[in-house]
């Protein structure tokens, strides 16, 4: 049985949504970060960073939301959450799957902290560039790869939901609003939101 270690109001939502999209049976293990449960020695054996989410699947254990999404999509191809390794769309899928932790999350932190970082130094360029590039990609729609929904949409959609819809850290744009409306209309997203709300 797959075990997902998660906590409400955290990056765990991404993996909660992904698991709901997958249709795979899994056990949710509440890891209450408000009490420091993620720093317990047994948990640190699963994720030495002491963060949620984390996942155990048989002998495999890993942390990091995008990595968990990549693992599930590849390990269980019947979920149809990733293009096959031989599919040319796989390249763009991987790019967008890691765009959120590599670009969107740092850009959000830059906006939140108001830190000025030269674009030549910041690996993500600038917050403006990140959201301009993402907007251009989402305008084509309906999903990041076109017609096919994938784990990359879970990672991008969860990040945008957090930044635009929930915490209003990133100004809304028409392409973001339309994309988020499609994401939040998905039954798996709605189930994950209900679970996260308790």
Image: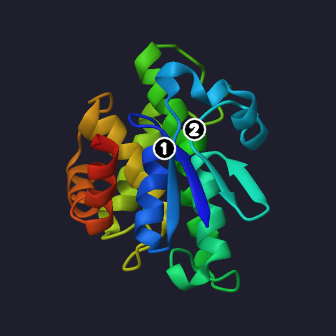
What residue is shown at x 46% (from left), y 61% (from top)?
18
The image position of residue 66, as x and y in percent, is 59, 52
Q: Check disc 1 and report the residue beneath it.
A: 12
Q: Is residue 160 positioned above or below 108 on the image?
A: below
- Quarter in which the N terminus is drawn: bottom right
Decide: is 11 above or below 93. above
Query: Counting other residues with Cα less than 10 Å from the Cα at mark 2, is it few (<14), some (14-19), or many (20 or more)?
Result: many
User: Residue 19's x, y, as percent?
Assistant: 47, 63
Q: Is residue 186 left or right of residue 1?
A: left
x and y percent of residue 114 in the render? 44, 13
Sort mark 1 into few (<14), some (14-19) or many (20+) by Cα contacts within 10 Å: many
Give me the residue at 23% from left, 44% from top: 173
- Left-right relation of 50 to 65: right
Residue drawn at point x = 57 percent, y = 68 percent: 93
In the image, residue 156 sits, relative to residue 50, either above or below, namely: below
Residue 171 visible in the snapshot: no
The answer to whether residue 14 is seen in the rendering is: yes
Q: Tell me the tag on residue 56.
A: none
Q: Earlier in the sequence, mark 2 or mark 1?
A: 1
Quarter of the C terminus within the rendering = top left
**87 above or below 27?**
below
User: What is the count of numbered marks?
Assistant: 2
Which of the 4 image quarters holds residue 17? bottom left
Mark 1: secondary structure: helix
The span from disc 2 to disc 1 (Cα, nearest Å) is 6 Å
Res 52 label: 2
Along the line of sight, the residue nearer the viewer: 113 or 21: 21
Q: Are marks 2 and 1 in contact (CB under 8 Å)?
A: yes
* Secondary structure of the residue carrying numbered label 2: loop
Decide if residue 101 is on the left or right side of residue 179: right
């Amino acid at each position: 049985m797959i075990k997902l270690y998660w906590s409400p109001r955290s990056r765990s939502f991404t993996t909660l949504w992904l698991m709901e999209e997958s249709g795979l049976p899994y056990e949710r293990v509440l890891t209450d970060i408000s009490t420091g449960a993620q720093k317990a020695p047994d948990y640190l054996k699963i994720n030495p960073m002491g963060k949620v989410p984390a996942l155990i699947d048989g002998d495999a254990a890993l942390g990091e939301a995008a990595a968990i999404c990549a693992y599930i999509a590849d390990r269980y191809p019947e979920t149809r959450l990733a293009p096959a390794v031989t599919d040319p769309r796989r390249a763009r899928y991987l790019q967008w799957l890691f765009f959120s932790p590599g670009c969107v999350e740092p850009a959000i932190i830059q906006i939140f902290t108001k830190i000025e970082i030269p674009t030549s130094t910041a690996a993500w360029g600038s917050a403006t560039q990140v959201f301009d590039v993402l907007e251009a990609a989402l305008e084509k729609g309906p999903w990041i790869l076109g017609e096919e929904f994938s784990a990359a949409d879970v990672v991008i959609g969860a990040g945008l939901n957090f930044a635009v819809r929930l915490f209003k850290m990133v100004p809304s744009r028409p392409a973001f609003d339309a994309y988020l409306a499609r994401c939040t209309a998905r039954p798996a997203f709605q189930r994950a939101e209900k679970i996260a709300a308790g």
